[in-house]
Image (tube, grey):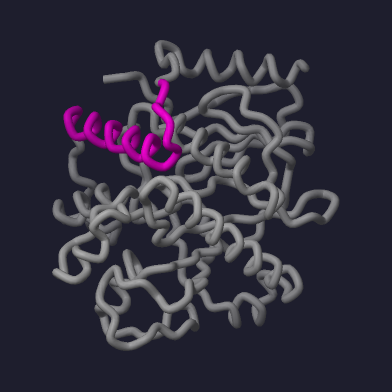
Amino acid sequence: MSQTITDTSFNFPGQKSVYKGKVREVYNINDQQLVMIATDRLSAFDVVMPKGIPYKGQILNQIATKMMEDTKDIVPNWLVATPDPNVAVGHLCEPFKVEMVIRGYLSGHAAREYKAGKRTLCGVAMPEGLRENDKFPEPIITPSTKADQGDHDEDISREAILSKGIVNQADYIVLENYTRALFNRGSEIAAKRGLILVDTKYEFGKTKEGEIVLIDEIHTPDSSRYFYADGYQERQAKGEAQKQLSKEFVRQWLISNGFQGKPGQNIPEMNDAYIESVSERYIELYENITGEAFKKADVSNIQSRIEENVLAYLKQ
């Protein structure tokens, strides 16, 4: 098994605080910059699995970096530099307390809700007569609350976000417009790779200057679901499951082993062979999403490598 990074305890010059999310750890440097480290932790159903996945952090960080570069002409983002394969450095932002989820197809959580008989999701109507993985007439925005670690993100409507003052109306309109623009661009990029961008989520923050920017990750297999375009129509016509690129395969494995993150359920054992297979799937995801061969970083001493690269960057 390759060495993984599942926890960090760095002490960088000018460090003010550390925030540990489900997958990323964010170091505040002098209240000016954020050093975001993508760990190899695997989260599903808002629960962090006990073992890390080799190269997962590098994969997520490098996909997000590439996608931010490919969308910065339409939506500004927080990113300044990537001094290490697992690290992104960007502007300190005040994050909005919502995740902007956008869905082009009836899949995943939306499909489970639809199957349960619901025809509205986050206050948005879903048409009658859809089958799982059918395309919506228009993409729908179905926001969720941004949960603290250990808590579950929850569906919330646009109306509730505004009435509770979670985001003001002027800012929320910007978030919606940016979400649609990013999804359109992401769909175009995916189509060039023979993929369909099914659904995804975006997170936004506000800089000290008051500019709304894209933060965190974008169009990664952790934040997005992709289908292979080839054979999509045929599989739908036959009522077959779609061939997809996302971490849904992990969720389905967990469900088949009796785990959905509900109280009283135990996380099933992931043996080394299964962990290695998940790592290989993430590499496949990277290569399909980016169209580039994945180059494994040196993980012989991953903690030291990250620390040295970040320190060298901060000294510049």
Tell me the residue at 49%/72% (across/down).
142
Residue found farthest to the bottom: 128
**In which quadrant will I find the C terminus?**
top right
Residue nearest the observer in this picture, 79 or 193: 193
- Name the spot of residue 115 as percent of width and height, x first: 25, 78
Residue found farthest to the right: 209
- Name the spot of residue 307 as percent of width and height, x first: 58, 17
Q: Quadrant of residue 31?
A: top right
**In which quadrant will I find the N terminus?**
top left
Is residue 274 inside the magenta stretch? yes
- Name the spot of residue 159 as percent of width and height, x first: 60, 82
Magenta region: 271-295
Residue nearest the observer in this picture, 287 or 194: 194
Is residue 181 inside the magenta stretch? no
Image label count? 0
Q: Quadrant of residue 227?
A: bottom left
Q: Quadrant of residue 236?
A: bottom left
Tell me the residue at 50%/55% (across/down).
188
Residue nearest the observer in this picture, 260 or 233: 233
Tell me the residue at 38%/24% (across/down).
4
Tell me the residue at 51%/39% (across/down).
24
Q: Main secondary structure of the magenta part?
A: helix
Q: Against 190, is 141 above or below?
A: below
Q: Against 122, is 265 above or below?
A: above
- Name the spot of residue 213 as percent of width and height, x first: 70, 52
Q: In the rendered view, does 208 fall on the left or right side of 58?
A: right
Q: In the rendered view, does 50 fall on the left or right side of 181?
A: left
Q: In the rendered view, does 50 fall on the left or right side of 238?
A: right
